[in-house]
Image (cartoon, coloured by chain):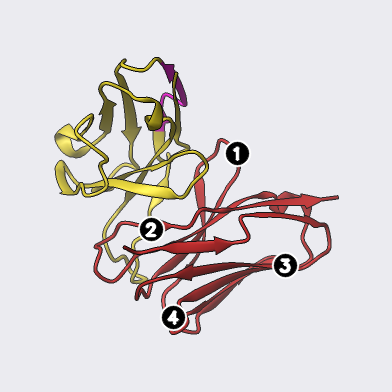
Amino acid sequence: ELKVEQNPLFLSMQEGKNYTIYCNYSTTSDRLYWYRQDPGKSLESLFVLLSNGAVKQEGRLMASLDTKARLSTLHITAAVHDLSATYFCAVIPETSGSRLTFGEGTQLTVNP
Amino acid sequence: EAGVTQFPSHSVIEKGQTVTLRCDPISGHDNLYWYRRVMGKEIKFLLHFVKESKQDESGMPNNRFLAERTGGTYSTLKVQPAELEDSGVYFCASSQEFFGPEGYNEQFFGPGTRLTVL
């Protein structure tokens, strides 16, 4: 059974600091997604990583993918309060059609 | 363009009762997915419709859950009878096609229905 593991699950950080969220998955996949969810809101797509070595950046967030290590990272640079949310990574395994398998989510709190 | 909508946003019912959740996908999206997140755990796949047909229902937990998508537009997910462990947030997502111009399937999510079974 495919497993997607995120760590940390809870992250409290101060504004201006940097941190990285890790996403490990247990089967081959070449499609990895990062989502953000604010309380009571939809999951918002942040990044789609489609190949080994892919790196994408949007504002203070940067995501990368290493398919050989089955690892993706979401790096936060100089955090601001507005980044407080829950972040999910999700994978579509090569053999499972189009359904997403999610990690447990990382609840990020950025303190002023 | 309207996003994926779900109704109700919250539902509180007693064990043994029936609840029906509704999802309206983005207009023109043939693919519709149901997922749920229980007790702060990972979001888990329930099933996938392509138009009105069930493409994959391998994630449905048991026969108390019934999903329909008559006419290939909106979908309902009925839980009958509800049990305590059914509590959680039920998400719906839709997508236009498996591989769009950029070569991937982007699923757009609704805000979810928070179900509480007492």
Proximity of marks 3 and 2: CB atoms separated by less than 8 Å: no
* Residue picked out by circle 3: A19
Residue occupying image coordinates x 50% and y 75%: A71
User: Tag 1's secondary structure?
Assistant: loop
Q: Give the chain letter at badge 4.
A: A
* Residue picked out by circle 1: A39
In the rendered structure, which disc, 1 or 3, sits on the residue that comes first in sequence? Answer: 3
Above or below — where is B109 with respect to B79?
below
Q: Give the chain letter at badge 2.
A: A
User: Tag 4's secondary structure?
Assistant: loop
Callout 4 and callout 2 share a chain: yes
Q: Identify the chain drawn in yellow.
A: B
Residue A60 horizontal side relative to residue A48, left or right: right
* Residue picked out by circle 2: A101
Q: Give the chain letter at badge 1.
A: A
In-front residue for pair B104/B87 = B87
Label 3 crowd (10 A; few <14 / some 14-19 / many >=20): few
Name which residue type carries label 3.
Tyr
